[in-house]
Image (cartoon, coloured by chain):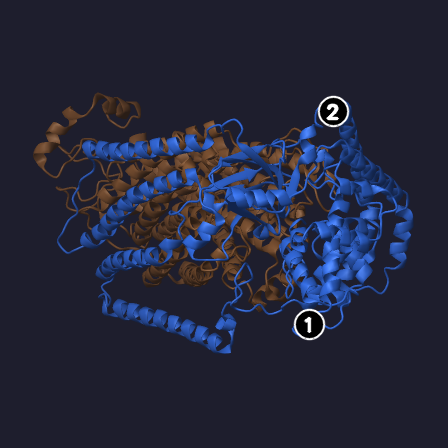
Chain colours: A blue, B brown
Amino acid sequence: MKNFLSKSMRLHFLKAGSLAVLLVLSTLQSFAELKIQTSATGLPVSEETVKAGESLFKSKCASCHALDRQTTGPALAGVTERRDLDWLLKWIRNNTELRQSGDADAIAIYNQYNQSAMTVFADLSDDQIKSILMYTENGPLAKPKDESGPGPVVVDEGLFNKTNKILWLLGLMVFIIVVLIIKTLDYVGKLTGREVIPWNNLNAGLMLAFLIIGMSAGLYELSIHGKYALLWDASSEHGEKIDQMMKITFIITGFVFFVTQIALFVFAFKYRQKKGVKALHYAHNDRLEIVWTAIPAVVLTILVLGGLKVWQNINSKPAEGTAQIEVFAQQFAWTARYPGADGELGKANYNLISEVSNPLGVAIPYKAKEVIEEIKKDIAFYEKSIEELPEKLGELKSTLGGRVGADLKAHQKQIDDIESGKEKSFLELQIRRRKTQMDRIERSLVNGSMYTEAANDDIVTTEIHLLVNQPITMKLRSRDVIHSALMKEFRAQMNVVPGVPTQFTFTPTITTEKKREMLNNPEFDYHIICNKICGNSHFNMKLKIVVEDQKAYDKWMSEQKPTFAVEEPVMEMESEDTPEHEETDEHASEEHSGEVAMTQF
Amino acid sequence: MSNDHGHHKETFISKYVFSMDHKMISKQFLITGIVMGVFGVAMSILFRLQLAWPETSFPILNWLFGDQWAPEGRLDSGFYMGLVTIHGTIMVFYVLTAGLSGTFSNLLIPLQVGARDMASPFMNMLSYWFFFLSSVVLMSSMFVSTGPASGGWTVYPPLSALEKAMPGSGLGMTLWLIAIILFIVSALLGGINYISTVLNMRTKGMSMNRLPLTIWAFFLTAILGLLAFPVLLGGGLLLMFDRLAGTSFYLSDIFLGGGIGALEQSGGSPILFQHLFWFLGHPEVYIIIMPALGITSEVISVNARKPIFGYTAMVISLIGISVLSFLVWGHHMFITGMNPFLGTIFLVMTLIIAVPSAVKTFNYLATLWRGSIRFTNGMMFAIGLVSLFITGGLTGLFLGNAALDIALHDTYFVVAHFHLVMGSSAIFGMMAGIYHWYPRMFGRTMNKTLGYIHFWLTFISAYMVFFPMHFQGLAGVPRRYYTFNILPEFAPWLDVNVFITLAAILGGLAQILFLYNFFSSIFNGEKATQNPWQANTLEWTAPVEHIHGNWPGEIPTVYRWPYDYSLPDADEDFIPQNVPYEGGEEEVHIAPVNPTASDAKEEPKENAVFFTLVKNWFGLRRA
């Protein structure tokens, strides 16, 4: 087995195996509906594979890629025709490594997409990647309209077709004509010496009309969109209090809104200039001032007290023994970590993060040592790269001729970066960073306090399951930039800040199932979505939350296995001569159902 | 006065380019502000296309931004954020700070207090040219290969600090910081000037209690700017160090993907930047809105032919807003990991600041009451401001309440709130000012018919654009999203987004009308009379033609406050400030004048001692 795969990854591998077995079995089924008969991946084409690929695509790729169009990354339909399979496997698993190895295509893509690097998916097996690729070969290009779920919504694109272009043009012409008519009237007025349009009265009337039409339009909108407002059916205990506070504020502000707006426009209409009427010279009245200072002050005091009460309640210290989970944010994905049987989350540190072997940076000694090994390799690589810079420069220069456009530009930039010393100083910076990181890990290993037993049974998941009516503390940790965990149905939100631990405690009160009934929407799910701009794919970063009763929760929990367990029997297969894929796969599939295996990734 | 400078020959460059005349500088600020405003508004319409028709290809986008940023006519998601960021930056700083306060402070402070020019004309000129330079640097960031700054106008690190965190955090972000630093220099040079001119260069008789409310607003705005901008300058410089020098003021515990790995920076806090940023950022919204409110006070009073109601209360509420505005910045950070206890304090302070704002609104309403309202273009925009200010201000009671902010933070509710209360409102204040003082600036009036159409289209579209956003926000739709297909429950809002975008296009078209009216009236507008609105303030006593030094001969002496409109015994319905009292006439605005004569005499005795003391203390009551 490949050396770079760590123990835990092999665990994943087993689960991937069960998928492969399914693939073999599924070849027997008909694939009349499938577009392709043979796949560039070399795997037999089957619906199951495509489906598995689809679910992987949605969880891993969809935040940056679509099949039929470029989003943050390129459109992926037909990618297997554009690229070589081996290259794709390498690229998807670790595009950074590929780029650093000097692969020209990898560098070109990196430059083409404004030097924003793709996420590393070291935990994906070959078969998984192939299933994703098969999905890209076979996936639906035009999204059907009735597709529920987060698929792109098809809109009327006819707005800018030819007919409508004419309509737009007509509209513009009407507009110009109106302007011209008004200007003509103006001139007539000027020539005849009297106003053709009584502007003052007209505008006064329009003010009143605006008030009436505007208010009606506002109320109409309330009647059609009010139901979407998150004022009802909060799914958490404190959420109900927030909703109540929100309603009180609504009533107060609504009242003030109507009174002041009506006064404003009615005054504007009523006191328009009339012949022979002089304005009242009325400069001030201290009593009035006191009254309309005091009334807002009293009302605001009520709001302040209400707000403080709810705020204090939400932020009060959670009771001892409140269940905890960690929610980990990175560009552009969420991961959850459960404390496992001991109820205590193991410690984690950003220095221990490795995209390949320890994505969450959980403090486990053997993981730390693996990371050190990786760092050593990295340093060696960077040092070698520095040595080879002159050579690389020569090669780049010799291949400069014949290039055009963006290709030439990117190529020239590489040359410039080396010649100006930018490349070298970047590599040196990377070496310094790695050495600092290694030093920190080594010291932490000597100190040892970070490495507690608690981490050993932690469970990393890509879905959150919560117990209904049980308080939960979400410990929020960010890998890179600020994110914000917005869970709108729970009226819960907290920023996830690198270097600053934050948390949010709440008690979910409505199970997913019940919520679906309430909303009359069988597809509904709770989600965490990111609500603080975190990069180009910020708009596509979510994590499913399932709220369920004890029974369902226990069932789900029993299916989860500690992610880092060292003493697990399956981990005995860590010797260098790992049995061949197929065997492992079958072995695994006997233990778990294929479906469960899928949710594990 | 112009004779004194007869020997000083004015060249084209010294008159129009490196001018030290405050009137010319105000025009420069205004026109630069308008040009930046055109960019800012155009950007908003372009990114709104993406929100309304996310799947549609717009050739115009490709034509404008090329294959890199709009491949196949669809905006790149990073560039979408770039447009949002630059739109915010332009509107907040370049249009509504420099374009609004810079223009009217420059034009009106010397003219309304009765000064020949600013305290330091040279610094004034520098202020404009730093602003100009800053505008150029900001716009140039649109052309760098990694795109403009894209982390939102609040540029929170680490996203903005790490070059590799997103493309826009590269050179574009550095240029953004440079632009803002230049901008701050400009704001400080201008602010010092405004303050010293108001304090030291008032004409004879112009005591602080006779200052027009515009000047009070500009004066307090300048003080806010002077105290708040340096903090952002500090914050920005630290961010620059983090970006370029490897310091870790804002960075800690970061592992960056894309082959960068764990960063060595340790011990910093991203929250620190947010504190520094919002310590400016919140006063900044008052820096934006207060000049607009000042302009509105003046325009409403002139065109309702009534004294502004509660002059003293207006000044006290402006001062109250100024002081409180420094104590509320944390309401932007309730859920950013700031200590919840601090949240309670900011909650209290934030809701308190609603009181002076409410007082101002009620005073505007009282000024309109029993007035004789002339719907000039300026007046209509001023009334529009009051309406938008109420609507936007009320939603502040939701967002200022920490508990409610948990649900509403960073949703479209916030977008609706600030676009109404400081975006549209301030734009309306600026428009009111432009229409009202256009005769003073260019010696001609703008076409009022076009002005009416402009007003109605802008007013209607402002509500159509921002009102529905409240509902989006209440439904939890996040802001700064490129598309909304992340959750199926956002699907119903697509139609609303189409509606909003169409309304925004309508609003944008209306501004073309304004641009045409503005620029063509400079040359073809009707010649203005000296005092076209029959106003009392000093700027209308100066000749229509601009002359160096503002008044030929003596500067007028001031005898009365600026709001003697519709005095019962006077023949005209206005008495300019430089008209002396006739025998027996008293300066009446200090004593309350009630509709019924009998009350008028009893009132002063009933006044609380405290208010009398406060009034004396501010010099608002003459002995």
Q: Is residue A153 above or below residue A253?
A: below
Residue A254 % position (x, y): 29, 46
Nearest to the observer: residue A458 or residue B389: A458
Nearest to the observer: residue A519 or residue B475: A519
Is A201 placed left or right of A379 in the picture?
left
Crowd class of label 2 (few under 14; some 14 to 19; many from 20; radius 10 Å) = few
- The chain under label 2 reads A
List the residue tagged with mark 2: A448
Quadrant in the picture for residue B234 = top right
Residue B615 % position (x, y): 27, 26
**Residue B535 visible in image:** no
- Label 1 vs 2, first from the N-terminus: 1
Is A516 placed left or right of A58 in the picture?
left
Residue at 73% of width from left, 55% of height from top?
A18
Residue A450 marker:
none
**Do tags 1 and 2 sit on the same chain?**
yes
Q: Secondary structure at mark 2?
A: loop
Q: Is residue A457 above or below residue A524?
A: above
Q: CA distance from mark 1 to mark 2?
A: 56 Å
Residue A31 marker:
1
- In the rendered image, the residue lying farthest to the front is A590
- The chain under label 1 reads A
- In the rendered image, the residue lying farthest to the left is B598
**Of the residues tagged 1 and 2, which is closer to the observer?**
1
